[in-house]
Structure formats: C-alpha cells, structure tokens
Amino acid sequence: MRPRGRFAMSSSAWLMRFAQRPAPSARLVCFSYAGGGGAVYRPFALALPSSIEVLAVQLPGRENRLREPPLKSVKAIVEALLPNLAPQLDRPYAFFGHSMGGLVAYEVARALRAQGLPGPARLVVSARRAPHLSEPDAPLHPLPDESFIAELDRRYGGIPAEILQHRDILELLLPAMRADMTAIETHRHLPGPLLDCPITVFGGTGDTRAQREVLAPWHEHTHGPVQVRQFAGGHFYFNDAAVRGQLVAELAHLLAPLAAQPAGAVAQ
C-alpha cells in the first residue's frame, strides 16, 4: 500500500527517512517483510531517540515505487541496493530486518564484508529462521493467484481484511508479493566467512514458522554473541502497538552504545 503522508527520500529512491536527524550519531537500516514497504518503519523512526536515524529500505514494486518491476532474487536485491546504501554507512549503524527483511539484511551484511566495507555493529533479525535452514513447506510462488493469496495469508497472516476484500488493490500489490516469495523460496544459502557482529533474534511466541528452535541457530553465522527474545504475538507481532513499544524500547537499548560513540566513528 502507499504510505500515508509524505516521507523524505534520501538521494536514492531505495531509502526512506521519516524524521529530520541533522547529525545522527548512529543509523538503523530497516528491511521489510515480503510484499511490504518501508513505511511500516515510520513508528520506529518517531519513537527512537533523536541520536538514531532510521533509514527504511524501499524495494521497487511497492508504495512510491509501485510502478517499478519488483526484483525476484535476493542476489538481485543485494546487488542493486548496495551502491545506494553504502554512502549512508558513514557512521556506526545496525540492521533490522523482519521476516524476508532479516534474510536480505544478513546477505547485505555479508556482501559488505566481501567488499571490504564496514559492516553493521549489530544485526537484528525478526521472525526469520536461520539462513541455512530450509523452508518447511512447498513453495508458494508457482501457485495461481487465488491459491497463492490464500496460502500466503494462512501461513503468515498480516494481509489486512480490507485488502483481501478489494481485488483491485490486491492486484496492485500482488506482483511484489509474488516476486518477494520467489526471492525467498529460490534462495540458497552459500557457506562463507562468518559475520563478526552480535546478532539479536526476535520473534513472536505464537509464530509457528519462527519458533525458538529455528531462531537460535543464527549463532552459526557470526563470531559474535547471539541473543534470542520472543514477544507476545504471531508472525507480525509488532503490529500490536503495545508490543511494538516493547520492541522499540529494546532496540533503543541495543543501539545506545552506537549512539554514544564519538562523532565521526564508523562501524568496523
């Protein structure tokens, strides 16, 4: 869906800003779930301390980029995003990715490392199984539209009833949803150097697709410590305002050391 109100874009259409932060001490780069747009992170930007600037990744095919063809592989997303994101990584930063966004954030962090660029000081993954674990169900992306929509909603929920009831709106959103599911379901994890940063893994206690047993194995992908914390709710647990408040408070706590670093410091 198109975002409500006007949001400032960076010099690249790939990134959204929601609040003026003239000289932030640190940045939080947010990656959205399959079919979702960057506007979902507006509440995060407004609630976090002013020392932290939120940048939301905006993939083609949604919201203000609705008319652009969506990308159908994680590799294509990473390759297109990296040159647009790199100029914004001039101070300590962390990544936050929900569901598909967690996978993309992880692969972007790996790509930055491969290019010898400073990586995130922390990777925060939400509702996403560890990348080496295979998907438990048959692929969604080859299904006909009706079956695709029904099964997507059954597995993950999160499609608002008002969208499901309006076929014209649903048809606008469908290409991005299908492209993103294609990207997830065709992605194969390739072994490589481990990350060095801490990884924090969040999830919903009622999310049957991202229970602790598939969240904890993120420890296999970093030399740093890994912490798993679950909040009340399902796959989209932070759609609940109270739970989102708890999540943002936790993010503020995790990012406080970055925001306290001297001006001009860059994550290593």
Image: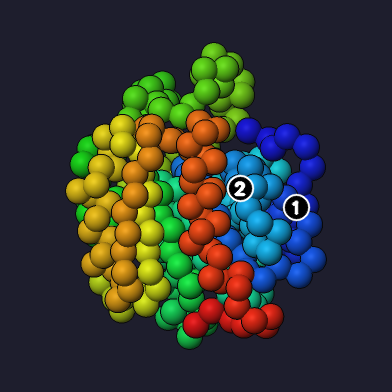
Q: Is residue 248 left or right of residue 181?
A: right
Residue 174 versus residue 37 in the image, above or below: above
Q: Where, quadrant-wise, is the N terminus in this rendering?
A: top right
Q: Position of residue 24 (x, y in %)?
A: 71, 68
Q: In what element is the residue under mark 1? A: loop
Q: Which percent across, then down, holds residue 34?
A: 46, 42
Q: Choose top left, top right, bottom left or bottom right for residue 252.
A: bottom right
Mark closest to the chain's N terminus, 1 or 2:
1
Looking at this view, is 77 or 54 the one in front? 54
Nearer to us in this view, 93 or 3: 93
Q: Residue at x 66, y 74 (%)?
A: 87
Determine the residue positioned at 34% across, 25% down.
154
Q: Position of residue 104 (x, y in %)?
A: 44, 58
Q: Is residue 124 left or right of residue 36?
A: left
Residue type pointed to by label 2: Phe
Residue type for callout 1 = Ala
Q: Which mark is residue 44?
A: 2
Q: Is residue 110 left or right of residue 29?
A: left
Is residue 161 in sight in this rendering? yes
Q: Which mark is residue 19?
A: 1
Rate crowding at label 1 as few (under 14), some (14 to 19) or many (20 or more) other CA atoms within 10 Å: some
Placement of 243 over or under 10, stated as above or below: above
Residue at x 29% of width, y 43% of height: 210
